Amino acid sequence: MALVKYNNNSISAVTSTGLATGSLVPIKTLTASGSATLSFVHGTDGVVLDSTYPIYKFEFINMHPSANARSLTFQTDTGTNTNYNIACTSTSFEAYHNEPDNDVELRYDTQYDNAQSTSFIHLASEIMSVDDASCSGTLTIFSPSSDTFVKHWISEFHGMRNDVYAWRFMKAGYFNTTTALTRFQFKLNSGNIDAGKIKLYGIKDS
């Protein structure tokens, strides 16, 4: 087999490929263990939520509820406020398929839409609590420190839903404030997060 070359050099001699590296920067990981809430607060334990990065991304790994049919939710706040009640308008749709293969659908979901709501926002709903069930996904926040624009976000989740469904949740929205967002809190609509990890990353400008 021929030796792979890069600009007429063997791979072992290449010191730079010119490809972008390190654009996704790890900031903080929180691990749930019977946790009522998990919160990322700017300036606390190395958490950065300012203009250092134009985009921030949360990754959720195997979020497992302590009780059955619970929903994973989030909200945000500004400054040192801890009310977590910023007005949000959002839209959502979902796809599902059950294990018996007799119920499938792709639909627009009005149940979890928000219209200037200050409540916690659903990311994934009715997650099963059996030992092998969980939900995983991502939440991306754009320019949370902007003092000019509202704060856009996009989320994508998949969960093992109550009644053994594979359930895909896709949402997007904006927090209707031009004040910088400095904290994000995650919790279930009821009960504790039995297990799971949330990782926060900053995404550099290209």
Image: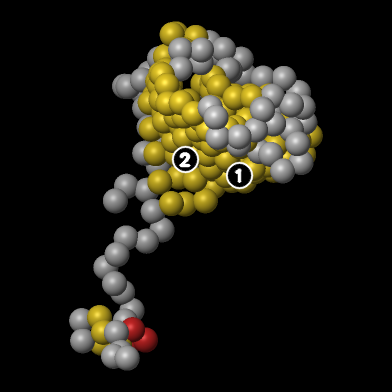
What is the residue that sits farthest to the top in this orientation?
116
* Mark linked to residue 141: none
SS label for mark 2? strand
Give above or below for 96 relative to 1: above
Left or right, 143 with respect to 183, comes to left
Q: Which residue is mark 2?
A: 57
- Residue drawn 37% across and 48% down? 204
Q: Position of residue 12 (x, y in %)?
A: 37, 86
Q: Looking at the image, can residue 44 be seen?
A: no
Three-letter code, disc 1:
Ile
Residue in front for this viewpoint, 166 or 41: 166
Left or right, 125 with respect to 190, comes to left
Give above or below for 205 relative to 166: below
Give above or below for 177 relative to 167: above
Q: Position of residue 155 (x, y in %)?
A: 46, 32
Three-letter code, disc 2:
Lys
Q: Position of residue 200 (x, y in %)?
A: 54, 43
Q: Which residue is mark 1?
A: 61
